[in-house]
Image: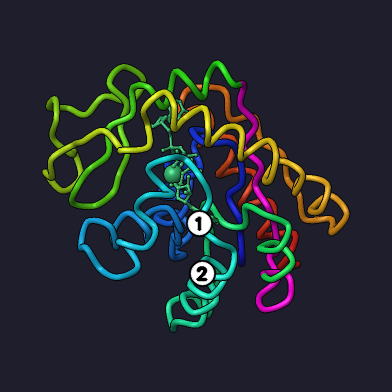
Amino acid sequence: MKFVFFGAPGAGKGTMAARAAVAFGLPHISTGEIFRAAMRAGTPLGLRVKAVIESGGLVSDELTIGLVRERLGEADAARGWLLDGFPRTLAQAEALAGFCPEDFVIDLEVSDAKVVERLSGRRMCRGCGRSFHVSLMPPAEEGVCDGCGGELYVRDDDGEASVRSRLEHYYRQTAPLVDFYKRRGTLVSVDGEGRADEVWVALEERMRGLIASAEA
Ligand code: AP5
Ligand code: MG
């Protein structure tokens, strides 16, 4: 089954897709995480995207589409996938519909106030990329990942100016895709405002229902 996790920055796409990957045994493919891993490793891709990501802009469609197309062609994605952070523009959505059409788009709906609260307290693991929150989802030991023991850090694009820019890009270029997916009949709206455990319980049940109905 092929799911797109959609929503504003801080909606919980990464948090929920990581749980869904475990629950449904599908690969979690986050374009943001692919770019951050490349930046950490200092690869040519990382050097190319660093400035635009840190300022809260969008990486070019050409580069992003090529990267996702290649990733979805890998063996572990043959049974399905969970895409997180892609597509973000109409060109990306049309490209995906052409080379590997989605089954469902999970639209995590959250208010702007919640986005700001979540991003201002987010901490990410340098080792495995898992996200925590200083008050909403704290790790057992401050500054240390519960999963792999890695060091937690603040993402370079979680500063106030970058968050504002990411939200502007979201409303201008990404939010209009809701209509695109409504027309395709694949949009599934989910209330993402609650606590992570509450959102996950409702989402898992919804995803199980979608999978059962698609396979019936
Ligand atoms: P990306 O990494 O995709 O960033 P984003 O879309 O801005 O989303 P975030 O990762 O900030 O939020 P999220 O929805 O995953 O929330 P999370 O689960 O972490 O992209 C980064 C950059 O890469 C982009 O700005 C762009 O430059 C580039 N890029 C990536 N894809 C691209 C593309 N397709 N085209 C062009 N450029 C691209 O949760 C946030 C916080 O809240 C965490 O602290 C978490 O612990 C907490 N939390 C989550 N859910 C809950 C909950 N229900 N209750 C309480 N706390 C919660
Ligand atoms: Mg994310």
The scheme the figure's colours follow is rainbow
**Residue at image x 61%, y 59%?**
3
Report the number of discs.
2
The residue lying toward the viewer, choosing from 111 and 168, is: 168
Q: Any magenta on residue 6?
A: no
Q: How far apart, in angstroms, are the residues tagged by discs 2 and 1?
A: 7 Å
Q: Quadrant of ligand 2?
A: top left
Residue 124 x/y as whole percent:
27, 39
**The residue stretch that appears in magenta:** 96-111
Contact check, label 2 and label 1, Cβ < 8 Å:
yes
Q: Does residue 5 sit above or below 135 in this rendering? A: below
Q: Does residue 192 sit above or below 80 in this rendering? A: above
> Quadrant location of the C terminus?
bottom right
Asked whether mark 1 lies closer than 8 Å to ligand 1, one says yes
Residue tagged by mark 1? 59
Local crowd at mark 1 within 10 Å, few (<14), some, or many (≥20)?
some
Residue tagged by mark 2? 63
> Quadrant location of the N terminus?
bottom right
The residue lying toward the viewer, choosing from 146 and 11, is: 11
**Residue at image x 31%, y 38%?**
156
Residue 215 x/y as whole percent:
71, 68
Kind of residue indicated by mark 2: Leu
Q: Any magenta on residue 106?
A: yes
Horizontal side, residue 116 vs residue 129: left or right = right
Local crowd at mark 2 within 10 Å, few (<14), some, or many (≥20)?
few
Residue 52 x/y as whole percent:
43, 49
The residue lying toward the viewer, choosing from 89 and 16, is: 89
Q: Circle 1 — which element?
A: loop
Kind of residue indicated by mark 1: Val
Residue 41 x/y as whole percent:
20, 63
